[in-house]
Image (cartoon, grey):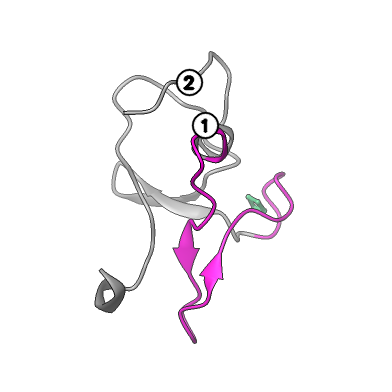
Amino acid sequence: MLLSYRGESVLAALTRAGFHHLRDAPEDAAPRGAFCCMGLCQECIVQVDGRQIESCRQLVTDGLSVTSLKRRSDV
Ligand code: FES
C-alpha cells in the first residue's frame, strides 16, 4: 500500500516510494522506467486493474491494483 496525494499520478507515487524499475524491455529484459513523464515514451507502462497503461497518465484513486511488467523468469 502506497501513500499518495490527491491528483498525483501513479508514476509520482511509485517514484516517491522508490520504485524506478517499472517494467522489463520485451527484447532483452533490460530494466525500464519513466523517461518523458508526459505520456509519450511509454517507458512507464504498468498494469493497473488489469489494463496496461502509462503510469504517468493514470491518477491514483482508492483501491487501484498496480503491478509491474517484469518477465516472469526473473520473479
Ligand atoms: S514516462 Fe513516458 S509515457 Fe510515462
Residue 74: where, in percent of width, then height? 30, 74
Residue 48: where, in percent of width, then height? 37, 43
**Quarter of the view holding residue 32:** bottom right
Which region shows up in magenta? Answer: 15-41
Q: What residue sits 72% from the left and 44% below the top?
A: 38
Residue 73: where, in percent of width, then height? 26, 78
29 part of magenta stretch: yes
Q: What residue sits 26% from the left and 72% below the top?
A: 72
Q: What residue sits 52% from the left and 28% below the top?
A: 59
Residue at disc 1, CB closer than 8 Å to ligand 1: no
SS for dot 2: loop
Numbered circle sitting on residue 32: none
Q: What residue sits 56% from the left and 31% below the top?
A: 9
Numbered circle sitting on residue 13: 1
What's the distance in space between the residues labelled 1 and 2, CA to CA?
6 Å
Taking the view exactly as shown, the residue that stands out farthest to the top is 6
Q: Main secondary structure of the magenta part?
A: loop
SS for dot 1: helix
Density class for disc 1 (Cα within 10 Å; few <14, some 14-19, many ≥20) is some
- Of residue 27 and residue 52, the one placed in the foreground of this image is 27
Residue at disc 2, CB closer than 8 Å to ligand 1: no
- Of residue 27 and residue 2, the one placed in the foreground of this image is 2
Residue 55: where, in percent of width, then height? 53, 44
Asked whether the residues under the numbered discs 1 and 2 touch, taking CB atoms below 8 Å apart as contact, a structural biologist would say yes
**Quarter of the view holding residue 75:** bottom left
Does 58 appear above or below 42? above
Q: Amino acid at mark 1?
A: Ala
The quadrant of the rendering that contains the N terminus is top left
Numbered circle sitting on residue 4: 2
Q: Amino acid at mark 2?
A: Ser
23 part of magenta stretch: yes
Taking the view exactly as shown, the residue that stands out farthest to the front is 18
